[in-house]
Amino acid sequence: MPPGRGARGRGGARRPLGRIVLAGAAFGVLSLGGGAALAHWHAGGEPAAASRPAAAPPPSPGASAVRSPQPPPPSPKAGASPSPLPSKSAEEEPDPPATVPLTGAGTFTTAQASGEKTGTGPLRRYRVQVEDGSGVSAADAAREIEGILAHPRGWAAHGRGTFQLVSANADFVIRIATPKTADKLCLAQGLDTRGEYNCETTEGVVVNLKRWLRGSPTFTGTPAEYRHLIINHEVGHEIGIRTHMTCPGPGKPAPVMMQQIKGLRGCVSNAWPYDENGRYITGPVVP
């Protein structure tokens, strides 16, 4: 016989207990239903407080925050050659000017500066001149060129010459000139620079102001890095490399003696004569 029927068929003394049991059961069902409904409301709206992670107590006044320890930087691989640090000029390079003066006074200011000898090999003294009206400081340009020639991937560091900045009695001159003046100086040597290029003259090097300030559209680095290419290329002629080179192969660094402004022919632009391992970056000679 089902238990519920037996309970109803027994004596009256047991009935109050049955009502109490039934009432308790009903209350329990109602409690469970209400709890389910409450849980359903929390799931559809704001998460229930019990399901949230306990919030950390606020720090006491004056307490300093403790940071998780950071992992140490990875150690350099054994045998790896460190890349050369960028030159100071590259780190502090301002945005290139929107416009460059096409012409200047046609007169030049010589940097009144002298420097230490750097490198090994035959001594080559040079002075730096900047055209008046170009907006470039002769002293600043001289110090930058001095740093370029002393770079660990440059000519001096690999026995191709000793260089010294002077203000008089120089072996060659590096002139920074506006495009019009550069064209005039280069044309005197039979070279058509078209307002765009640099050239070598019997007196030294003529650097087009546009290239000095703005770099080249074919060069991926900053104008300051491109100035390394300008000086290394033109001084390469000064130390006896009279020919130009072309790209040695797709994806390889372009030689500095390549006229990179005229196209890279699959090479990667490069501003230094030597790579990080001291190997000379060369290529086929242009006939």
Image (cartoon, rainbow, N blue to C red):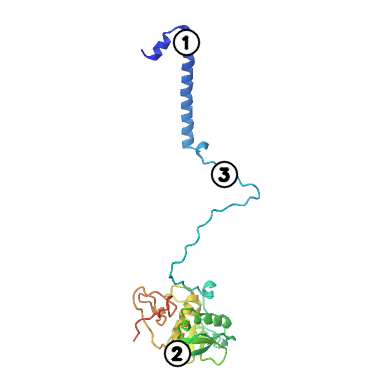
Which residue, given by chain and number where applicable, does mark 2 sit on?
187
Closer to the camera in the image, 19 or 278: 278
Q: Earlier in the sequence, mark 1 or mark 3?
A: 1
Q: Residue furthest top?
A: 11
Three-letter residue code for mark 1: Arg
Q: What residue appears at the point 50 percent right and 89 percent down from the top-left corner? A: 124
- Residue 202 lies, in percent from the top left, at 47, 92
Q: Earlier in the sequence, mark 1 or mark 2?
A: 1
Which of the numbered marks, if any, corresponds to residue 15? Answer: 1
* Disc 2 residue crowd, few under 14, some 14–19, many 20+, Cα 10 Å: some
Question: Which callout, 2 or 3, points to the residue nearer the camera?
Answer: 3
Which of the numbered marks, if any, corresponds to residue 231? Answer: none
Could you tell me how far apart the alpha carbons at marks 1 and 2 are, in whole angstroms?
Answer: 125 Å
Q: Earlier in the sequence, mark 2 or mark 3?
A: 3
Q: Quadrant of residue 113?
A: bottom right
Which residue, given by chain and number where applicable, does mark 3 sit on?
56
